[in-house]
Image (cartoon, grey):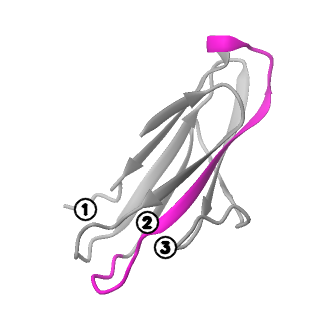
Amino acid sequence: MTRTGSTSRWFKIDITDHENSTYEISYTASLTSPPGMDFDLFVYTGDRSAPDCLASGVKGTGSPESVTDVWSDFPALETNRWLSIEVRYVSGTACGSDATWTLTIIGNTAGNP
């Protein structure tokens, strides 16, 4: 999934396990800020029933900023998770298309077969 924007924004994502396997479940969220602009990425992990915007967020690191998480899959249990993803404006004075960030979420990044 890829989204773009030019202001602070929130996204809600349900990571659903569709297989009865023991593979790990994983994702990577990455945020690319345009030159001259600074946006930060925060990911808040909820449980299988709802997002949790009040949870402690994990701030993205690196360039582009990214957050990766991996957890075990248990075939007899629901291992779905809700994510709340925040793109937060920090600084910069660009406008319009010069201020556009790109958020990319990729699932199954743990290298399972």
27 horizontally vs 41: left or right: left
Q: What residue is at 46 percent from the left and 59 percent from the top?
A: 14
**Distance from label 3 to label 2 (Cα)?**
15 Å
Q: Which residue is mark 2?
A: 70
Residue 103 on image: x %, y %: 53, 36
Nearer mark to the viewer, of 3 and 2: 3
Furthest-left residue in this view = 113
> Given the image, on which type of amino acid does mark 1 rest?
Asn
Looking at the rendered structure, the secondary structure element under dot 2 is: strand
Few, some or many residues within 10 Å of mark 3 (<14, 14–19, 20+):
some
Few, some or many residues within 10 Å of mark 2 (<14, 14–19, 20+):
few
Residue 83 seen from this side:
yes
**Distance from label 1 to label 2 (Cα)?**
11 Å
Looking at the rendered structure, the secondary structure element under dot 1 is: loop
56 horizontally vs 47: left or right: right
Look at the picture and state if 30 lies above or below 3. Answer: below
Name the N-terminal-most of marks 3 and 2. Answer: 3
Q: Which residue is mark 1?
A: 112
Image quadrant where one finds the C terminus:
bottom left
Q: What residue is at 38 percent from the left and 79 percent from the top?
A: 78
Few, some or many residues within 10 Å of mark 1 (<14, 14–19, 20+):
few
Q: Which residue is mark 3?
A: 48
Residue 64 seen from this side:
no
Q: Quick one: 53 or 42, which is closer to the camera? A: 53
Q: Which residues are magenta?
A: 73-97
Nearer mark to the viewer, of 1 and 3: 3
Quadrant of res 73: bottom left
Look at the picture and state if 104 lies above or below 52. Answer: above
Residue 67 on image: x %, y %: 55, 52
Residue 57 on image: x %, y %: 69, 59
